[in-house]
Image (cartoon, rainbow, N blue to C red):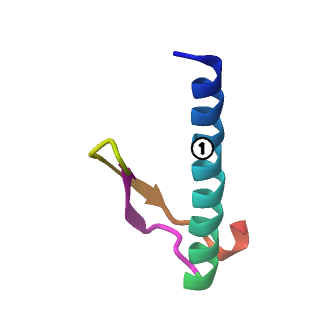
């Protein structure tokens, strides 16, 4: 694969990771005390023009309000 492809892929994945983490942290803060709770998270990736739909699911453990 080309260097341009690799760089654009890494840039996109970094943006997804950073903005997703921020969104999850904001939601946790708004929810209040989520300590001891587990949440199922799902990401669905689609790429227009490639007929790609990729789904990733996982668990995120909440945190106590004091841990913010």
- Which quadrant of the rendered structure holds the C terminus? bottom right
Q: Is 42 covered by the magenta stretch?
A: yes
* Residue 33: percent from left, percent from top: 57, 79
* Above or below for 42 versus 54: below
Closest to the observer: 13 or 23? Answer: 13
Dot 1 falls on a residue whose secondary structure is: helix
Q: Residue furthest top?
A: 1
Q: Is residue 2 magenta?
A: no
Residue located 58% across and 17% down the image: 2
* Residue 61, position as x, y percentages in the image: 48, 59
**Percent position of residue 62, x then y:** 52, 66
Please give the name of the residue rendered at 57% of the width and 74% of the height, measured from the top-left corner: 28
Q: Main secondary structure of the magenta part?
A: strand
Closest to the observer: 49 or 12? 49
Task: Name the residue located 64 percent from the left edge and 18 percent from the top edge.
Answer: 3
Asked whether, in this view, residue 66 is left or right of residue 31, the answer is: right
Between 1 and 59, the one nearer to me in the picture: 1
Q: Which residue is mark 1?
A: 12
Span colored in magenta: 33-47
User: Is the residue marked by circle 1 packed among few (<14), some (14-19), or many (20+) residues within 10 Å?
Assistant: few
How far from the left and from the top, in percent, is residue 23? 60, 68
Choose between 12 and 43: the one closer to the eye: 12
Tally of numbered tags? 1
Q: Is residue 30 above or below residue 5?
A: below
Q: Judge whether 58 appears above or below 4 on screen.
A: below
Residue positioned 56% across, 66% down in the render: 24
The vertical placement of 6 against 43, above or below, is: above
């Amino acid at each position: 694969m080309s260097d341009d492809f690799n760089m654009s892929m890494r840039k996109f994945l970094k943006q997804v990771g950073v903005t997703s983490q921020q969104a999850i942290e904001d939601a946790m803060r708004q929810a209040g005390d989520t300590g001891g709770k587990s949440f199922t998270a799902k990401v669905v990736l689609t790429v227009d023009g490639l007929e790609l739909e990729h789904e990733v699911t996982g668990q995120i453990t909440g945190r106590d309000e004091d841990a913010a």
